Image (cartoon, rainbow, N blue to C red):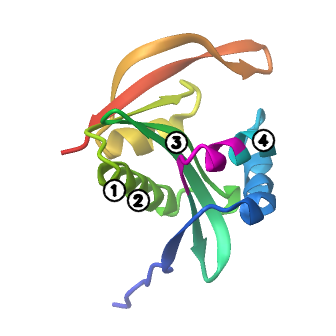
Amino acid sequence: MSAVLRPELTFFPMLEADLDEVLAIEVEVYEFPWTRGNFSDSIRAGYGCWMCRVDGQPIGYCVIMNFAGEAHLLNLSIAAPLQRAGHGGRLLAHALKAARSGGARLMFLEVRPSNSAARELYARSGFTQVGNRRDYYPASQGREDALVLSIDLP
């Protein structure tokens, strides 16, 4: 039997200088991507903005807003060719740890009902649905609702 080594995933604070790399992933994975301004504003506002890299190459990122004991996961993305390889779970674990370190006791997020891969990731990580936001996301045929999920951060 041979061991399969997982590539080393490293996490770094996202900087303005990283935004070209971030946007390259963002436009690849979303039909309605965030803009450079969305990311830049998040960095300037002091949100938890993280990049993850394998062998120095950017493969994903997340943005977390912490406030008053709660965290809101605003964006979590892995480059399309590297999805479903465990990187999203590892990035989410980092996001949960960062939120806890920032004093959050609870994390919320929104996810499209049509995004089954993300919904499965969040369910495996312990998130549960606590609400629904009607017509939250832009969609090719109008709008799509968002499922609101949460997890306690003990």
Spatial separation of the CA atoms under disc 4 and disc 3? 27 Å
Q: What residue is rendered at 78% in x and 50% in y?
A: 28
Q: Earlier in the sequence, mark 3 or mark 2?
A: 2
Is 13 on the left or on the right of 67, as rendered? right
Is residue 20 part of the magenta span, yes or no?
no
Between disc 4 and disc 3, the foreground one is 4
Task: List the residue tagged with mark 4.
Answer: 37
Over which residues does the magenta segment extend?
41-49
Q: Which mark is residue 117?
A: 3
**48 or 111, which lies in front?**
48
**Image location of residue 23, percent across then percent down:** 78, 53
Marks 3 and 1, how far apart at CA = 22 Å
Q: Amino acid at mark 2?
A: His
Q: CA distance from mark 4 to mark 2?
A: 24 Å
Q: Which residue is mark 2?
A: 94
Question: Which residue is at the far left?
Answer: 154
Q: Are marks 1 and 2 in contact (CB under 8 Å)?
A: yes
